[in-house]
Image: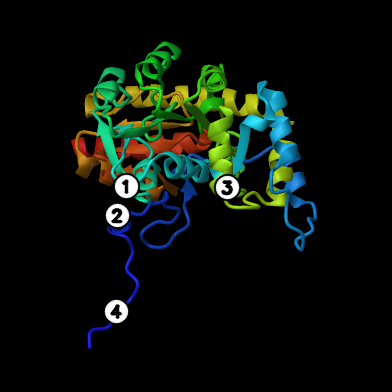
Amino acid sequence: MKSRAPQPKPYILDIAPYVPGVAKAADGRALVKLSANENPLGCSDAAATALAKPHDAARYPDPDSIALRTALGELHGIDPAQIVCGTGSDELLNLAAQAFAGVGDEVLMPRYSFSVYPIAARRVGATPVEAEARDYGADIDTLLAAVTDRTRVVFIANPNNPTGTHLSNEDLARLHLGLPDDVLLVLDQAYAEYLEDEGAAGLALAGAAQNVLVTRTFSKIYGLASARVGWATGAPHLIDALNRIRAPFNVTGATQSGALAALGDQDFVRHSRRENARVRKAFVARLAQLGNHGVRTVPSEANFVLVFFPDQPTAERVRDRIADAGYAVRHLPGQGLGDALRITIGRDDDMVKVGDAIEATLICEVR
C-alpha cells in the first residue's frame, strides 16, 4: 500500500528559500560581515543598555507595542493608531501580501528587488511579476505598463535593495497616481534613514492616500538587526487588516524597550548617516579609479554599493580574494547579478582592505 503524507500546496514548493548573507569562508573561518547591510557602528549606547536590562520573561509583552508606536508617532508626526509593529519589516511585507493578494492574483515589483517580495507573493498563491528595470532601478513607465486587472500589490524598495537606487519624490508620486485605487502600493523604506530627508515624502503619501503602506525597520541604521523589530504605517483600514493577521505578542518586551531607546537617540542616527555617506563616497571614488579594469558602481543612496565586474568569473574571484582578506560580501547570481557584488559600507579600515583585495585581484589578472 502506497504511503501517504501531508503535502504542501504546489505554490509553496515553487518558493526559492531566502538565502542570507554569508558570515564564514568556505574553509569555515569567521568573516567580518559586509554581506547583510548591518550598521558597522552597532547600535546606540541607550539601545544597548535598554536591551541588557532584565525583563520579566514569564510575562507576555505589550501585544500592541503602545509605547513604541506612540514614540514613532511623535517622531514622524503620525497618529499611533495608524502604526503597526512587527517582527522586522519582513513580517509586515509578508502580511501585506497575505492581506491583499491570493491565488490567481499578481504581485508586481521591479527587477532586481528585495528577494523577500517574490516569496511573500508565492506563499499566498499569488504570482510574482517583475517589470524590467532601468539602470538597475525601478522604471515607472514599465511598472505601470505591467499592471493588469489581476494586480493587487506593488512592492517598491526606496532606496532599493540590492542596487541602492532611489526614486525621486516626483517619480514616486507619478507611480502612485498611475496605479488603480484598488492596488496596494507597498513602499519598503528599510534604508530611508540613510537619506537626508529620511524618506519623508513616502510617509506623507502613506498618510494621505488610501492605498499606500510604508514599512520600516530598526535593523539597518538603528543597528538592531538581532532584535527583529519593524513597523508600518498607512490608512486605518490597511493597518486594521495587518493587525487582524499578525502574530499576537509579535514584538518582545526587550525589543520594544530597545527600539524605544534607539528612537530617543537621534544623534546616533545622524552620526551613522554622516559616517556612511563619507565612507561610501571614498570607497566609490577608489573603485572609480579601476574603471579601466571593467569596474563600475551603481549610484547608491543606501549603506551598501553594488559593484560590477567584467563578468561572473571575475566577480567570483574578487569575492574569494575579499574572503581571504577576512570579509564576507554578497554575490547574487540568483537575482541576475552574477557579475556584481553587493558590498556593505563598513568602517574606514574595512573598506580600505576590501578595496585592496579588489585592486590586487584585478591588477594580478592583468599582469
Residue 87, labelled with which disc?
3
Q: Is residue 45 left or right of residue 142?
A: right
Using a 10 Å C-alpha cutoff, classify the residue at mark 4 as few (fewer than 14 neighbours), some (14 to 19) or many (20 or more).
Answer: few
| Rendered location of residue 282, percent (x, y) | 46, 23
Amino acid type, residue under disc 2 in the picture: Tyr
Q: Earlier in the sequence, mark 2 or mark 4?
A: 4
Using a 10 Å C-alpha cutoff, classify the residue at mark 3 as few (fewer than 14 neighbours), some (14 to 19) or many (20 or more).
Answer: many
Q: Secondary structure at mark 4?
A: loop
Whether pointer 1 and pointer 2 mark residues with C-beta atoms closer than 8 Å, the reply is: yes
* Identity of the residue drawn at 31% across and 40% down: 105
* Identity of the residue drawn at 35% across and 54% down: 17
Number of marks in the rendered image: 4
Q: CA distance from mark 3 to mark 2?
A: 24 Å
- Residue linked to disc 1: 103
Q: Earlier in the sequence, mark 1 or mark 4?
A: 4
- Residue linked to disc 4: 4
Q: Secondary structure at mark 1?
A: loop
Q: Earlier in the sequence, mark 1 or mark 2?
A: 2
Residue 136, picture quadrant: top left
Q: Nearer the viewer, residue 62 or 238?
A: 238
